[in-house]
């Protein structure tokens, strides 16, 4: 019985050693696989960082161009507003001048009528020299 027990323990020890060897084999494979994947990850991370840098530069350029466009739009709108106001002022002044011209024409005709009446009252033609 003691000999049988020894054989059983020896067998159990052999099985445990075999299992340990198998686990060590899996561990080595896992470490190799981890190293391989870590290398892939590092390459992809470097590629990502480059792409991110290009993207951020492009975004800065985009934002800068957008800000310039917006500022130019505001300037254009302000200039258009001033031009519109100037046009309205010019039109108002043209209407005012047209009214003054009409008034001047009426006044001029009235003056001519009065001068004609004055010339006709003394029966003589009025002369500048007496």
Image: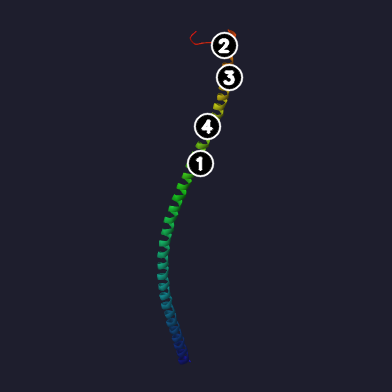
Q: Nearer the viewer, mark 1 or mark 4?
A: 4
Horizontal placement of 44 versus 113: left or right?
left
Q: Nearer the viewer, mark 3 or mark 4?
A: 3
Q: Which residue is mark 3?
A: 109
**Closer to us: 128 or 74:** 128
C-alpha gap between disc 1 and disc 4: 20 Å
**Closer to us: 93 or 22:** 93
Which comes sooner in the sequence, label 3 or label 4? 4
C-alpha gap between disc 3 and disc 1: 48 Å
Q: Residue at x 47, y 49 (%)?
A: 66
Position of 80 relative to 110 (above/below):
below
Which quadrant of the structure image shows residue 92? Answer: top right
Q: Disc 1 vs disc 4: Cβ atoms closer than 8 Å?
A: no
Which comes sooner in the sequence, label 1 or label 2? 1
Badge 1 marks a residue whose secondary structure is: helix
C-alpha gap between disc 4 and disc 2: 42 Å
Q: Which mark is residue 90?
A: 4
Badge 3: residue crowd in 10 Å (few <14, some 14–19, many ≥20):
few
Q: Residue at x 44, y 86 (%)?
A: 14
**Closer to us: 43 or 85:** 85
C-alpha gap between disc 1 and disc 2: 62 Å
Q: Which residue is mark 2?
A: 119
Which comes sooner in the sequence, label 3 or label 1? 1
Badge 4: residue crowd in 10 Å (few <14, some 14–19, many ≥20):
few
Q: Which mark is residue 77?
A: 1
């Amino acid at each position: 019985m003691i000999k049988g027990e020894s054989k059983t323990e020896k067998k159990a020890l052999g099985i445990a050693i075999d299992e340990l060897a198998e686990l060590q084999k899996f561990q080595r494979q896992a470490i190799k696989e981890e190293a391989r994947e870590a290398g892939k990850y590092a390459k992809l991370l470097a590629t990502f960082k480059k792409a991110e840098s290009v993207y951020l530069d492009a975004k800065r350029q985009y934002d800068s161009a957008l800000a310039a466009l917006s500022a130019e739009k505001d300037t254009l709108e302000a200039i258009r507003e001033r031009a519109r106001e100037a046009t309205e002022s010019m039109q108002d002044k043209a209407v005012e001048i047209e009214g003054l011209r009409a008034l001047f024409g009426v006044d001029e005709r009235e003056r001519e009528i009065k001068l004609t009446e004055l010339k006709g009252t003394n029966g003589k033609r009025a002369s500048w020299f007496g």
